[in-house]
Amino acid sequence: MILSFGSFLALLIAGAPMVFVLGVAGALTLAITGATPLVVVAQRLYNGLDSFPLMAIPFFVAAGIIMEQGGIARAMVGLATALVGWIRGSLFMVATVTATGLAAISGSGSADTAAISSILLPEMRRRGYDIDYAAAVVASAGVLGPIIPPSIIMVVLAMISDLSVGTMFLGGIVPGLIAAIGLMLGHWLFARREPARYADAEPFSVPRLGKAFVAALPALAMPVIVVFGIVGGIVTPTEAAVLAVVAGLIIGLFIYREIAIKDLPAMMLRAAGLSSAVMIIIGTASIFSWLVAVQDVPQLAAAWLQTNAGSPAAFLLAANILLLVVGMFMESISALLILMPVLMPVAIQLGIDPVHFGVVVAINLSIGLITPPYGICLFVASTVARRSVMQVSRVIWIPLIPLVLMLLLSTYVPQVVLWLPRTLMQGAVP
């Protein structure tokens, strides 16, 4: 056990890519101890990827790319502008509302951040917005992607913990909407500090809103297909992801006409590359997770947590702190595969609803998308804004406040997470 975690930490501190940290730490432990043949590395790598639900990941990634390039993101921005463009600091609000809509399509925070950044950050710069805070706004909007369904994080989490994907998806809706409202309130308070600088609001117009709504109707159909298809038991998450790709292609090619047939090979190649990066991490993480399991780490950790965090409230606080710290340094899928086999059994033994705890875990790791040094949404927004991560990190704490408050509310008021699943799934959540 000491060898496994020692090599893991050494490679992590040395700055090795996460895929090597996880894979090499496991293989090195097996090679040195000699207790298990090295062929187990290949077997665990294959077994970690041999899962039908995981096939949803490359399709959701492809749907996000189609959304970004096919005019869907632009249509959502137009609708958001007509809806909240009259509020002071209007583009801050537009970014958050757009992200809420895109979150119901792609399931990926980085895809949402990339789409919103490319459209809104140049306009924010042109209007004289504080560009560091503008990048922080767009990055924090990307956090909504893995919370509001569909969510790649929740698909993986449900697979690991043997939970219903549809129930997990429903559990993320209310926290995601609370987060969106909290972010908008924080942006509005920030804009009030310099009224003249952010007084670019446009008058609200019902005809303009109606026109934007009609233009965005094809885009709005995608979340209906995905979320209600899964929750209604019509399709599996993987089938819903395939439907999202097909619907996105039809909308982008024939309705918005912002992509052409000739663009498809490059888009699919990009989707394959991004998906491969995620899937290989899942594969190598399964090696390390298996090694941790056979060394009885989950049982030891469970015993320690039960002794030192004997109440549900104390355990949830400890889990939140652990996950927020882990999210600062580790990719979310890797963190799930390593930590969930340890934390979920303890949560269940303490009487915590597994769906409630699963959604809380997803929220924690979603917040990790904007916490330096690893936060991928922070990197994407900073790059598009042509600012360093350090410059944007100086103001990222402002949108972090409403996100952490939403996390605490979801943690200690379980009904925030469980009310919608219990209402719509008719008792499927115990």
Image (cartoon, rainbow, N blue to C red):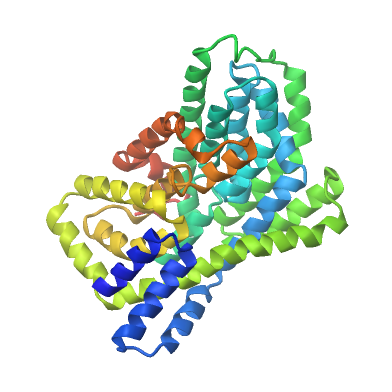
Q: Residue furthest left?
A: 307
Q: Is residue 39 visible?
A: yes
Q: Is residue 56 visible?
A: no
State whether residue 407 is above or below residue 362: above
Left or right, 300 with respect to 62, comes to left
Q: Nearer the viewer, residue 196 or 342?
A: 196
Q: Tell me where residue 416 sits by quadrant.
A: top left
Q: Residue at x 54, y 38 (%)?
A: 388
**Viewport quadrant of the N terminus:** bottom left
| Quarter of the image where the C terminus is located | bottom left
Image point 59% across, 9% down: which residue? Answer: 196
For this view, does 55 lie left or right of residue 11? Answer: right
**Quadrant hosting residue 208:** top right
Please say if 428 is above or below 36. Answer: above
Locate residue 291 relative to residue 426 in the image: left or right: left
Residue visible at 86% across and 57% down? 261
Residue 305, x across and y down, in percent: 19, 57
Horizontal and vertical percent position of residue 171? 44, 47
Most foreground residue, 366 or 30? 30
Residue 60, given in percent of the width and then of the height, sits at 63, 57
- Left/right placement of residue 120 relative to residue 356 reads right
Q: Please state the total of marks drawn on the protein image.
A: 0
Residue extending farthest to the front is 14
* 292 vs 84: above or below: below
Residue 218 lies, in percent from the top left, at 76, 42
Viewer-proximal residue among 203 and 170: 203
Identify the residue at horizontal 53%, vertical 76% (top origin): 50
Closer to us: 259 or 127: 127
